[in-house]
Image (spheres, coloured by chain):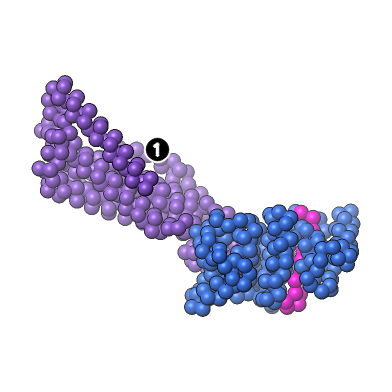
Chain colours: A purple, B blue
Amino acid sequence: MKGKTEILWALLVVAVLLGLWELCVHLLQLPPYVLPPPSRIFLAFARDFPLLLHHALVTLAEVGLGLGIGVFLGVGVAVLAFYVRPVGRALTPFLVGSQVIPVFAVAPLFVLWFGFGIWPKVAVAAMIVFFPVAVNFLDGLRSFGPELVEFFQALGTPEHRIFRMVRVPGALPFFFSGLRLGATLALVGATVGEWVGASRGLGYFMIQANARLRLDRVFAAILVLVLLGLGLFWVVGLGERLLLRRR
Amino acid sequence: MERGEWVSVVGPSGCGKTTLLRICAGLLKPHSGSVQVFGKPPRGQAAYMPQGDSLLPWRTALGNILAAREADGRLEPEAKKEALALLADFGLAEFAQSFPNELSGGMRQRVALLRTFFARRDLLLLDEPLGALDALTRAELQDWLLGVWQRFQKTVIFVTHDVEEAVILSNRVLVLTPRPARLAALFPVDLPRPRERSDPRVQGKREAILGALASSRVP
């Protein structure tokens, strides 16, 4: 029940803020190409819904593919770094330092390298997902003491089974905190990639609308992005609850 | 060692009791010489219970106990029934579905001990399993552990720093010297079980072992 009241409060806050926004726009008589009122944004959202959906699906596909590739590579590199010591030692500073890599600044390069299709955006999303997943999963694999593993090692359990029974479940909470971080950022990454150069996707839609001073459409696209982000967050949370249930 | 025997290892802290167990478990290689368990290299021959919390926090008590069999590959269909019966026989029936963080320290050690007994191994290596418990829980668990051991009739090597505990539980008590550890003395304890702590024969053994420990300290 606590969750429900919290949601109600959140909705109330949003409603109040939107009301103030609407009021300000009308009182200050701001033209819609400077700041459209929420009512106009919702109207644009409803009218352009099929178009928005079309572009949203493109963005979602980019993020989905990016997530898949980023998770696959991130987990792979973490496992490699965990088992092959020299690799781990060589990669750790890069993984730790990866937080400072301006992934968004690399987006134009990716467009240059991979063309205007969905692949440069997939690459940006994958890169954004890769680092937190790799760093967190590796942290997770290293997170518990040897006691948990030694019981099984002494029994002569082969390492692949120890990996499955002990190491992966032990590292999963870390993995998910990395994935949650990556999933939402990947959406931003894909959108930025679309700003730089695309012919489809929400980022493209926003650039087009912005150029025509259709700010109601820009905001409608932002609304869709927010919804997508919430959806991604929810899906990751659902996966987490399913895999880590009753913990 | 004889089959079904309980041998305790006592010695000053830091003398290498844990190292000895880890070598017997096949987790460490001795610098020189070799260890054989049932005539084979040690790895995989014994069930080793490390010091400290070694239960998997994401598994229930039952799940943790079953892990001892899953470790060998496929889980037999009757294993779950067997494990539940074991939990029930040793007073843990109501905790079968509890996770380690929901259990007290004593209960966690009981589960970890049952898990070690549940593994299909004839030799158990227990590293101070009661070391972190308060005195009352500890005495209670000593009796409990004796019950489990008598049911299974497995060979046990038991590391402890509590001499009285060693006397109460063991067939033989091995006393190690300070680093580098050597065998200082070997005390057979042929008293009928269960042994009372207040029994003068128990106290006598205790004094003798403490004496051996003290004299081993003088070079």
The reply, left or right, for residue A63 in relation to residue B6 is: left
In the rendered image, residue A170, in percent from the top left (x then y), is placed at 49, 56
- Compare residues A179 and B57 and report the one nearer the observer: B57
- Compare residues B192 and A60 and report the one nearer the observer: B192
Q: Magenta residues: mostly which secondary structure?
A: loop
Q: Residues within 10 Å of mark 1 (few under 14, many from 20)?
A: few
Q: Relative to A164, is A91 above or below?
A: above
Q: Residue at x 77, y 67 (%)?
A: B169
Whether residue A133 is visible, yes or no, is no
Q: Residue at x 59, y 71 (%)?
A: B88
The reply, left or right, for residue B61 in relation to residue A128 is: right
In the rendered image, residue A151, in percent from the top left (x then y), is placed at 60, 64
Q: Quadrant of residue B49?
A: bottom right
Give the chain letter at badge 1: A
Q: Residue at x 30, y 41 (%)?
A: A8
Q: Quadrant of residue B27?
A: bottom right
Considering the numbered disc 1 on the image, is that residue within a helix, a strand or a loop? helix
Residue extent of the magenta highlight: B1-13
In the rendered image, residue A162, in percent from the top left (x then y), is placed at 51, 64
Q: Relative to B16, is A53 above or below?
A: above
Amino acid at dot 1: Val
The reply, left or right, for residue A106 in relation to residue B191 is: left
Outermost residue to the top? A28
Residue A128 lies within the magenta run = no
Q: Residue at x 51, y 62 (%)?
A: B59
The reply, left or right, for residue B38 in relation to residue A137 is: right
Q: Relative to B43, is A147 above or below?
A: above
Whether residue A237 is visible, yes or no, is yes
In the rendered image, residue B132, in percent from the top left (x then y), is placed at 68, 54
Total count of labels: 1
Residue for badge 1 = A100
